[in-house]
Image (cartoon, rainbow, N blue to C red):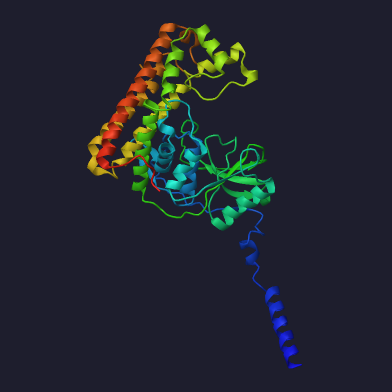
């Protein structure tokens, strides 16, 4: 009888413990979240005299930057004497992914995009609304994953939306996740003062194109100098691919295409459904003469801006690298000047590629002239030659610094 009483007492105590256990356990396990939540903003303060961010139109580089900056893990900014602010995080992403060194409108593959996160100590994971693309998540599952990352991991998530076409990150939600709160900045040309962040609500965010990236907890926090070493390695490797390797043909196709007559250019696009020097293919329903002509005009505008900005960020990167490698100041300053000149081959409005037919809109009558397109083709050749010269300079620098081609672990 005494034994039975003891067992009964033990069972009673256990039941009481379960009933009165702290309710916080449920939220920690991911089952209960508040109806609305926004992460605290830990972005770095911007001095009031700084009114503009440098051109920063690459979505995935902005996403990396906003993720680090908003969560207080970023590498800061470089404030130019001209009142502009150059984002170190954005610059690192543009370089380490290889984007800034490509010869044409070639965007990084998924593994290349994630290289910058891995270099910074993260292990990103992507989920898709389209099961054909990869690991599938329903809308309910994705909503739960977003809430978990925000509330439990304490970090933004990356979910590109059309209304924020230069990139943003999700920093909160409303109405139990039916509305997402996104954070970002306007591009330099869209606001008189573009260093004021924008918080925008996005509804109806789930569709078959939705891709969610959970960056995950940081396993290590590398010194920024390590990331600059990795960036220098990628500059060399991507310029090697562009000058001597798998990407070389993009320069050649672009130059040769401009030297064709207009009828031959039209015929080539109808055959290949693509225009050398720009990205993407024409779909079957996009092959009318008018649509092809409009697509060809893109190699004048905005192709020049795309390529000028890419090399501009190579220039920005080596300029920033000087403070981390002061013993190589002279070589890095020479690279700074070189890639500025490379950018100007495409972007100079007086005597560069962009000056021949203008932009917004393109002077179609001038573009029809073979001698005009020939001068544009010459600029593409000069651009390729400048990349080759830049590669030689980078190779000499990295040999001296003993930076090998293999990626850092």
The residue at the far bottom in this view is: 2
Q: Say which quarter of the image contains residue 82.
A: top left
The residue at the far right in this view is: 1
Residue at 41 percent across and 7 percent down: it is 371
Residue 196: x percent and y percent?
A: 48, 41
Q: Is residue 88 left or right of residue 212?
A: left
Residue 124: x percent and y percent?
A: 52, 47
Q: Tell me if residue 201 comes above or below residue 366 in the rendering.
A: below
Residue 200: x percent and y percent?
A: 58, 42
Residue 248: x percent and y percent?
A: 41, 24
Work out which quarter of the rendered image holds the N terminus and state it. Answer: bottom right
Q: Is residue 45 left or right of residue 169?
A: left
* Residue in the foreground of this view, choosing between 334 and 33: 334
Q: Say which quarter of the image contains residue 352.
A: top left
Kindly tell me whether residue 185 is visible in this rendering: no
Q: Is residue 39 left or right of residue 253?
A: right
């Amino acid at each position: 009888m005494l034994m039975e009483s003891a067992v009964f007492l033990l069972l009673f105590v256990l039941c009481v413990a379960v009933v009165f256990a702290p309710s916080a356990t449920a939220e920690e396990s991911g089952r209960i979240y508040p109806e609305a939540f926004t992460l605290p903003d830990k972005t770095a303060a911007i001095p009031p005299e700084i009114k503009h961010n440098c051109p920063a139109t690459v979505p995935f580089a902005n996403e990396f930057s906003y993720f680090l900056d908003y969560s207080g893990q970023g590498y800061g900014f470089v404030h130019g004497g001209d009142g502009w602010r150059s984002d170190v995080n954005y610059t690192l992403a543009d370089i380490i992914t290889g984007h800034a060194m490509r010869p044409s409108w070639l965007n990084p593959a998924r593994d290349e995009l994630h290289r910058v996160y891995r270099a910074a100590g993260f292990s990103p994971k992507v989920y898709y609304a389209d099961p054909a693309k990869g690991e599938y998540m329903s809308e309910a599952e994705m909503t739960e994953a977003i809430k978990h990352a925000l509330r439990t991991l304490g970090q933004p998530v990356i979910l590109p939306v059309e209304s924020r076409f230069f990139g943003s990150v999700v920093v909160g939600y409303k109405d139990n996740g039916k509305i997402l709160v996104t954070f970002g900045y306007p591009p330099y040309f869209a606001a008189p003062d573009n260093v004021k962040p924008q918080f925008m609500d996005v509804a109806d965010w789930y569709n078959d194109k939705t891709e969610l990236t959970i960056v995950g907890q940081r396993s290590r926090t590398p010194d920024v100098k390590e990331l600059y070493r990795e960036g220098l390695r990628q500059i060399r490797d991507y310029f090697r691919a562009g000058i001597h390797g798998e990407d070389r043909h993009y320069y050649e196709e672009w130059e040769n295409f401009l030297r064709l007559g207009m009828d031959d250019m039209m015929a080539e696009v109808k055959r290949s459904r693509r225009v050398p020097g720009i990205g993407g293919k024409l779909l079957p329903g996009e092959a009318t003469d008018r649509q092809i002509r409009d697509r060809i005009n893109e190699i004048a505008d905005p192709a020049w801006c795309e390529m000028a900005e890419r090399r501009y960020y190579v220039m920005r990167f080596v300029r920033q690298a000087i403070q981390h490698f002061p013993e190589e100041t002279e070589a890095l300053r020479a690279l700074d000047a070189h890639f500025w000149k490379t950018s100007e081959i495409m972007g100079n409005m007086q005597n560069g590629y962009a000056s021949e037919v203008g932009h917004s809109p393109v002077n179609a009558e001038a573009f029809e002239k073979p001698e005009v397109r020939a001068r544009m083709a010459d600029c593409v050749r000069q651009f390729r030659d400048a990349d080759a010269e830049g590669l030689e300079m980078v190779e000499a620098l990295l040999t001296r610094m003993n930076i090998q081609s293999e990626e850092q672990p």
